[in-house]
Image (cartoon, rainbow, N blue to C red):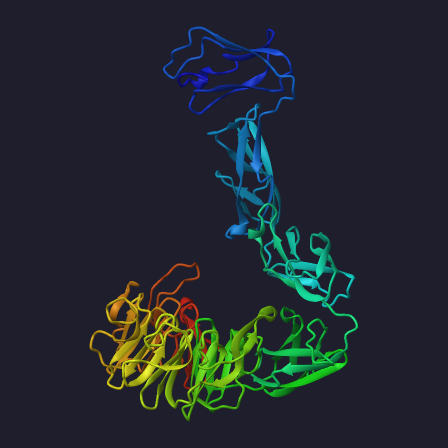
Amino acid sequence: MFSEPMDPRTLTTATLKLLRDSTPVTGRVAVSADGLRADFVPDTLLARSTAYTLVVAAAAADLSGDALGQSATIEFTTANAEATRASVRVAPESVAVVADSNSPLGRVLLSATARDSNGNELSGRTVAWTSSNPQVARVDSTGTVSGVALGRATITAAIDGLSGTSAVAVLVPIQSVRFAVNPATLPLGQTARLVVTATDSLGRLVSGWRVAWSLAEAPHLSLVSAVAETLVVKAESVGTGYVGAYFYLQGRGPGSSMGGYPQGYVMVPQPGVTVGSIALTPRTATATPSAIVGFLATVRDAAGNELRNTPITWSSGDASASVWSDPQFFGRRAQVRPWVGQGSFLITAASGGRWDTVRVNADYVTFATASIALNDNECGLTLAGAAYCWGSLSFGAGGYGDVTGTSSWAPVAVTGGLTFSQISVGFWYACALTSAGAAYCWGDNEYGQLGTTVGACITDYYVFRPCSAVPVRVSGQLAMTQLSAGGEHACAVTTGGAAYCWGRGSSGELGNGATTNSSTPVPVTGGLTFAQISAGLRSHTCGVTTAGAAYCWGNGTNGELGDGSGTSSPTPVAVAGGLTFMQVAAGEVHSCGLTTADEAYCWGSEVLSGGGASMTPARVAPGLAFTTISAGGGYTNTCGLTAAGAVYCWGVPNTADGSRVEVPPTMVQGGLTFKSVSARGISAGAIGVTTDGVAYEWGLWDSITPYKIRGQR
């Protein structure tokens, strides 16, 4: 160490020497960046228990050129122990990336640490990074490695003449992972082999990835061995569960997994059990081509006790409909898909010599109107008033009797033979109104949003939740002229103009002055006579009176009540501005209204140009006249329908890269003529029905380009 910075040009092996007796030791000199320290680094390890002398010659000079004037010596004796060598260590020493530098898994940051012969870390040193094969893996000056092509490369970090390496493997990205070998049943006490495989975007097998296995959800199994893609388990007890597996990159951990988390379901059946009966629900279903219909099998013994650990065989009586067992319900649920436009098919489930059969009917559908909700469940009415639902149909939202919540991206008919004139969709539930004014709802009932008390449906792994998989009449026998299903509450207007709401009420969205839930309709306070009402997608409601005055209630912290206060109210408050409305639409965090002059006004979050909020009604889409308007969720998505059948949408959606970009009123593409629109979908999604009865869906994020819902001609 020096008391002031030295000129590194004067610190060489000529001025800094290490002597053993009088013989110089070969080596090199390393000077710190600040010039205050110089190290003599021997070419070989020093001998143990040996005297050495370090000599600094008088010619060594500081940065001003002033020499020491006289030499300095330091004598020392090495210890009687194995000496450590100065080194550079790169971490991780081995690592894998994918051949895609644009993916986070296609890059990894390496670190290099230098230590002297005493094990002390040498800081402030410059690191030079190189790759042995840049065509496979590149490395930049920061130590960031990027995968280029399949193969291997050695990354070297050099510091003051020393170097360390990291072995990098560049692998093919995984597109999907599945169980290639998965025994559905395993006799008690026996062992079985499970094999999981990964494939790339072209369906080719991928190798080189690490595999992690989990038996956390399969307590009836024990681990025998786990080697790469192969797992061997033993059936220790009767039960059903799943084995989990995921592929990850060496040196990266679970966060580098790709291809998903497949689950291999294994049942260990009860030996010697006699099956007494098997029954399927629902008993029948009507679906459009390519729809997926769910059926649940219940197996019982002769005494009527349910048997869950009994194998079931499913089959279709016609090649035009496929059927497969869904292991997520331990083989109890089957998913049926008709492939033809019209037909009727029998589905059979058998277990222990017993069987049951149900019928699936298939036909195309033509719509009169359709509705969509934030969680992506959708419903529509045919020209004859029959209800169909599709999308995410958890908690009985399909309405055809499937209690397991099978999702379908083509319409399935709601059961019950009811004819409806209106339909509205909320979060995993829907409500519809008959021409006689009777309201029916089906789906999730966690907060009482079905307007009555019901039983339970099965979610994944036999967890039960209040719901009805078939339409149930809303309590009170009220005669209604219009209804609206919000996120988790619903509202309706009676023939006398009174407004009633039911379901979740924690923010005052029921309008009865309370902040509690209700499973029966409660009257909205204030003595107002309503012509139309709209239940919001989160926690507020708006309505318009027969005189054209707009009122809102519930949560108002985003300005969605429109009274200028920015506060909440459990009872109706008048929307400011003195405008005369013919329709209101409550979205997620904003509201809109259509005046008698066909002009659109909105209030709440992000309704102004530039994405600003407005506590009172602000004119939107100037220059356009609408016949109806729909306020949605997903970043204040709004759509309006013109008298000519054109639909315009606007809002501030997320783009593909996650940024927020304002979309001005833009006409839906495709030259279609619409007769209805609903803008209440997830991530600024909307659905519309054309004048010829075809339903289309689109989103603000995809240039408002509609695509046709499946199951239609």
Image quadrant where residue 626 sits: bottom left
Up/down of 603 relative to 482, above or below:
above
| Left or right: 433 in relation to 309 | left
Instruction: Evaluate whether residue 643 shows in this view.
Output: no
Q: Residue 696 at x, y = what percent? A: 45, 78
Q: Is residue 49 above or below residue 186?
A: above
Q: How many marks?
A: 0
- Image coordinates of residue 338 in percent, x first then y, are 61, 81
Front residue of 325 and 549: 549
Query: Residue, x 71% and y 75% (percent of image)?
Result: 312
Q: Is residue 631 left or right of residue 303?
A: left
Q: Position of residue 448 (x, y in %)?
A: 45, 77
Residue at 37% across, 80% down: 501
User: Is residue 335 visible from the viewing direction of this image?
Assistant: yes
Q: Which residue lies most toward the left here?
A: 578
Q: Nearer the viewer, residue 264 or 514?
A: 514
* Residue 178, horizontal then vertical, whole percent: 65, 62
Say which quarter of the image contains residue 525: bottom left
In the image, taking residue 688 as reference, residue 270 lies left or right, namely: right
